[in-house]
Image (cartoon, rainbow, N blue to C red):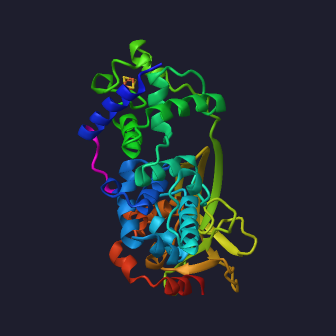
Amino acid sequence: MVDSPALTRRLLAWYDRSRRPLPWRSSRDPYLIWVSEVMLQQTTVLAVIPYYQRFIARFPTIEALAGAPIEEVLSVWSGLGYYRRARMLWQGARQVQALRGGLPRTAADLQLLPGIGPYTAAAIASIAFDEPVAVVDGNVIRVLTRLERIDGDPAVRKIRRQIEATAARLVDPQRPGDSNQALMELGALICTPRAPQCSSCPWQSDCTARRHDQAEMYPQKAPRPALTKIERVALWIESDKDQRFLLCRIPDRQVNAGLWEFPAADRSDLSVRIGPVVATVKHTITRYRISVTLQSAELEQPTRVPDDCRWVSIGEAQLLGLTSATRKLLSQLGRATQSDLSELPAQVADRVDPSRVRQQTES
Ligand code: SF4
């Protein structure tokens, strides 16, 4: 077994020299740490930074987030993906505000809030409140399975427990937040999935995978399931009089619920004449490879627009939360650039009266 205190000391010394000056590291405000940790789930640091800054500028406190309508939260989150995270964050903020006691201070209590699992709870509790609990994410799993050559799939409970026990031994009781962040930083910067820079690693003399020249063999994983292909046809329906186009809100309890997209071609409540293909996109979500073909279409007269659909201008579309595929399709159509649609500029956000947005888009 490794000498944990010595390893932790070397790890912290390396972290103090090498850590990146990330925006959420300049504060120990538990709300800001919460937002950053939720955004960092399934998204890279570089991708998160501009979204984090925009989100915090718009919702600087739990109260600001709890007081905003979910449509506005989704709009500011738009482009970051995995929108369930934004909904859970918002629900959690409302719950905290209702309790009037601020965020809970322990990992166990934090997990009572929606969307906060063991990882996020441990990150907030250790970084903001100095609770000596270990954080285990993908980076930590990679580093520790290499350090101790832990065989087996980390998704298997017994292996996961072994990793958690190793992580717990490495938490520094005086600087738990820093030792957790240091371990994640080591995985992000040095102990990378491919070609780890072992010669720059503070643990190079202790690491058993390095000693056996087997670093890239860890972590061991079960084979991934094959991607499932999904093909969809959506409709580009433009109004003759003002060049608005039709978008529909995805119903609750479906993937991307609450976001807006082009109407599906197989809707039975839209009577249309279908024209040529105007754009196609492919994108991958988890294990689904989705291909969307957008065809132009004209409404048959008279056709009532369904209640969940709205005519919108490009400006109004920017104020809605759009699916990634919808943003890509609009970009292909030359209606907007990807960056136009992935961002809700602060100056626009500042002008947005959420109740007005709802009236414009839902009336
Ligand atoms: Fe990872 Fe190499 Fe460091 Fe081992 S020595 S923890 S494999 S970077």
- The vertical placement of 76 against 47, above or below, is below
> Percent position (x, y) of residue 272?
68, 74
Q: Nearer the viewer, residue 320 or 203?
A: 203
> Percent position (x, y) of residue 197?
32, 26
Identify the residue at image location x=23%, y=38%. 17
- The vertical placement of 228 against 231, above or below, is above
> Percent position (x, y) of residue 127?
41, 50
Magenta span: chief secondary structure = loop
Q: Nearer the viewer, residue 175 or 332?
A: 175
Q: Is residue 81 something that shows in the picture?
A: yes
Q: Residue furthest right?
A: 268
Magenta-highlighted residues:
18-23
Q: Nearer the viewer, residue 24 or 174?
A: 174
- The quadrant where residue 306 appears: bottom right
Query: Does the magenta run of residues contain 22?
Result: yes
Q: Residue furthest left?
A: 17
Identify the residue at image location x=36%, y=57%. 28
- The vertical placement of 26 against 19, above or below, is below
- In the image, taking residue 15 as reference, residue 271 lies left or right, namely right
Q: Residue furthest front?
A: 174
**Dividing the image into 4 quarters, which one contains the C terminus?**
bottom right
Q: Nearer the viewer, residue 284 or 292?
A: 284
- The quadrant where residue 335 appears: bottom left
Ligand 1, image quadrant it occupies: top left
